[in-house]
Image (tube, helix red, strand yellow):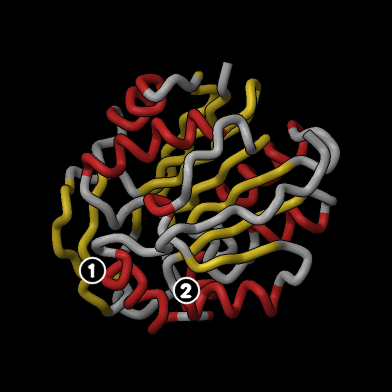
């Protein structure tokens, strides 16, 4: 696949919970980028994609945030990046900062089915604000959206939470996650082959925040 994807229709960009999920990112804006944009493991994941992708690949970035570093680096390499985020603030920032990519306001759960449409899909810490049942369904849809041989990069904070209120970056948010050993099984159940699974510790540059454990998984569709 080497051509830029056509505009994807979004029949109702938001679903239940979208506005709650957007609220902290609308408030944080570039503060979120400053805190998390220089994650070594995220940059390594993008490097891995850049080494694997065919020329002019079509990439879907779920929870694209401010567009940096993911969409910025991938589009600079000549790939066609479409980013979706629930936060209008993030979409506006991304459109300004990364004009070479395309960004739209949408919850991933509201996107129509796109079988085989993408050479790669990324989700860096962006699937933590939906119930577990929706999360499992979303992984299955992501696998369906990938072309054969397509790549999925997932970053998560592995915890045993299901729509639980937590304090994060000075805000109260509702978060969902799984223990680290569960994530590879979820991706395999969705039909993907896990080729990389790494745990790391990151110290966010934000007052009052402690160390976070992060999990980075790379997967391929057979």
Front in this rendered view, residue 94 or 204:
94
Q: Where is residue 10 in the image (x, y as percent from the top left)?
A: 49, 58
What residue is at 39 percent from the left and 31 percent from the top?
140
Residue named by callout 2: 32
**Which mark identifies residue 173?**
1
What residue is at 81 percent from the left and 43 percent from the top?
3
Q: From the viewer's perspective, is 105 left or right of 48?
A: left
Q: Position of residue 87 (x, y in %)?
A: 44, 73
Q: Position of residue 165 (x, y in %)?
A: 15, 64
In this rendering, the answer to whether 191 lies above or below 177 is above
Cα separation, mark 1 vs mark 2, equals 14 Å
Picture mark count: 2
Q: Around disc 1, counting alpha carbons within 10 Å, would you say few (fewer than 14), some (14 to 19), or many (20 or more)?
A: some
Q: Can residue 203 be seen in this view?
A: no
Residue 99 falls in image quadrant: bottom right
| Mark closer to the chain start, 1 or 2 | 2
Quadrant position of the N terminus in the picture: top right
Residue 153 falls in image quadrant: top right
Q: Can residue 41 be seen in this view?
A: yes
In this rendering, the answer to whether 40 lies above or below 200 is below
Front in this rendered view, residue 170 or 84:
84
Q: From the viewer's perspective, is 191 left or right of 18?
A: right
Q: What element carries label 2?
A: helix
Q: From the viewer's perspective, is 74 left or right of 217?
A: right
From the image, state whether disc 1 or disc 2 is nearer to you: 1
Front in this rendered view, residue 185 or 62:
62
Q: Residue furthest top?
A: 222
In this rendering, the answer to whether 66 lies above or below 122 is below
Quadrant position of the C terminus in the picture: top right
**Which mark identifies residue 93?**
none
């Amino acid at each position: 696949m080497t051509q830029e994807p056509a505009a994807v229709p979004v029949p109702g960009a938001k679903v239940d919970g979208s506005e709650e999920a957007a609220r902290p990112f609308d408030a944080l804006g570039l503060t979120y980028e400053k805190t998390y944009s220089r994650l070594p493991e995220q940059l390594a994941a993008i490097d891995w994609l850049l080494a694997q992708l065919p020329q002019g690949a079509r990439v879907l970035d779920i929870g694209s945030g401010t567009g940096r570093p993911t969409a910025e680096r991938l589009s600079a390499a000549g790939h066609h990046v479409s980013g979706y985020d629930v936060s209008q603030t993030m979409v506006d920032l991304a459109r300004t900062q990364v004009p070479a990519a395309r960004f739209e306001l949408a919850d991933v759960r509201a996107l129509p089915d796109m079988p085989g449409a993408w050479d790669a899909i990324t989700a860096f810490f962006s699937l933590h604000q939906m119930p577990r049942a929706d999360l499992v369904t979303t992984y299955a849809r992501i696998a369906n959206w990938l072309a054969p041989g397509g790549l999925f990069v997932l970053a998560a904070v592995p915890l045993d939470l299901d729509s639980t209120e937590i304090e994060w970056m000075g805000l109260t948010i509702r978060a969902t996650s799984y223990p680290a050993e569960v994530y590879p099984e979820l991706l395999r159940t969705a039909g993907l082959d896990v080729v990389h699974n790494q745990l790391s510790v990151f110290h966010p540059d934000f007052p009052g925040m402690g160390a976070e454990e992060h999990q980075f998984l790379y997967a391929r569709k057979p």
